[in-house]
Amino acid sequence: MSLRVETSVIPESARHASEVERAYEYCRRTTRTHAKSFYFCAQFLPREKRRAIYAVYALCRHVDDEVDELTVSDEQGARAAVDRWRTELDEVYRGGSGGASPVLIAWRDMLAHYRIKPELPLELMRGVLMDTFQKRYETWDELRVYCYRVASVVGLMSSEIFGYREPITLKYAEDLGIAMQLTNILRDVGEDLALGRIYLPREDLVHFGVTEDELARGEVNDRFRALMGFEVARARGFYHEAEKGIPLLERDTRFTVLLAARLYGRILNEIERADCDVFTRRAHLSFGAKLRAAPRVWREARRL
């Protein structure tokens, strides 16, 4: 007598669910590895919103990294990489698979829950591509366009996940993105110089009498400190304006956004504490500093 052994078949829906879970886990690890402050703040979001935020960050990170890796030696390759992301993301928005990338698998699932206009990630890609052809910015207005594209649109996408009551909330999200990107620029002056980039507007360099040669030599003199003080004050103005929008967010996200704004804003304090030396050290907050800041910000967020 022969025995008949039946093999179990995993249902298609179960396989799909497992694939989606793996994709979100990939996005989570990407966020944890490359954006420690962002990851720390996201831990206080509800699970579904937290996973969606990881997916948004992972897409931004992958596109930016590919362009950064290729820009120096292969500008055409950088544009081709962005074009590939555009094509695959467009397929996702049209209901297709978008390929096997875990980032796009997570996006496909996320878009079933949150309404993120396709124009937003496309605008981000335009901003990332600016690094392939623009190494200097003449005016603040020029730089603000860059900040909007690479950072404010992240805030606009995130706002659709956070949830908000009034359309003006999106204006404040734009402000927070500009504040954070300007903070990045001030923190990374030395690192960007090594890549041949100066984001500080030329009009501001001229106004404070700071030359590109001085920047290249890493000179921290009174004129450079005055320039940095001006830019720090500009960033703080955007943080101050952005916080007006936090009470307009859904309650379960206010603490995360306020904490992110406060922690990132404290990088400016670290720059000042280092006497504006952004050439030999990188301003950052320790994990302990983030933990110590959280309870006070949590109490403040509860009152919003």
Image (cartoon, rainbow, N blue to C red):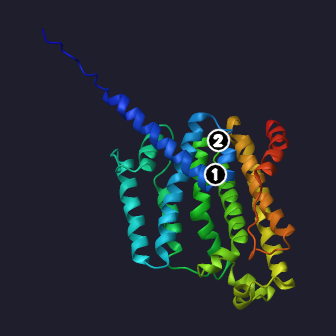
Question: What is the secondary structure assignment of the residue under circle 2?
Answer: loop
Residue 164 tag number: 2
Residue at position x 72%, y 41% in the image: 254
Question: What is the secondary structure assignment of the residue under circle 1?
Answer: helix
Quadrant hosting residue 230: bottom right
101 or 173, which is in the foreground?
Answer: 101
Horizontal and vertical percent position of residue 273:
86, 67
Mark 1 highlights which residue? 170
88 or 195, which is in the foreground?
Answer: 195
Ranked by sequence position, the earlier of labels 2 and 1 is 2
212 or 114, which is in the foreground?
Answer: 212
Horizontal and vertical percent position of residue 154:
58, 55
Q: Using residue 259 as the reference point, say whether residue 11 is left or right of it.
A: left
- Graded by Cα atoms within 10 Å as few (under 14), some (14 to 19) or many (20 or more), the crowding at tag 1 reads many
- Graded by Cα atoms within 10 Å as few (under 14), some (14 to 19) or many (20 or more), the crowding at tag 2 reads some
Residue at position x 41%, y 71% in the image: 79
Residue at position x 80%, y 85% in the image: 208
Up-down relation of residue 123 to residue 110 (above or below): below
Q: Using residue 101 as the reference point, say whether residue 192 is left or right of it.
A: right
- The CA distance from mark 2 to mark 1 is 9 Å
Up-down relation of residue 28 to residue 203 (above or below): above
Residue 168 seen by the camera: no
Could you tell me if the residues under marks 2 and 1 are in contact, i.e. CB atoms within 8 Å? yes
Horizontal and vertical percent position of residue 123:
50, 62
What amino acid type should be assigned to the residue bearing mark 1? Answer: Leu
Quarter of the C terminus within the rendering: top right
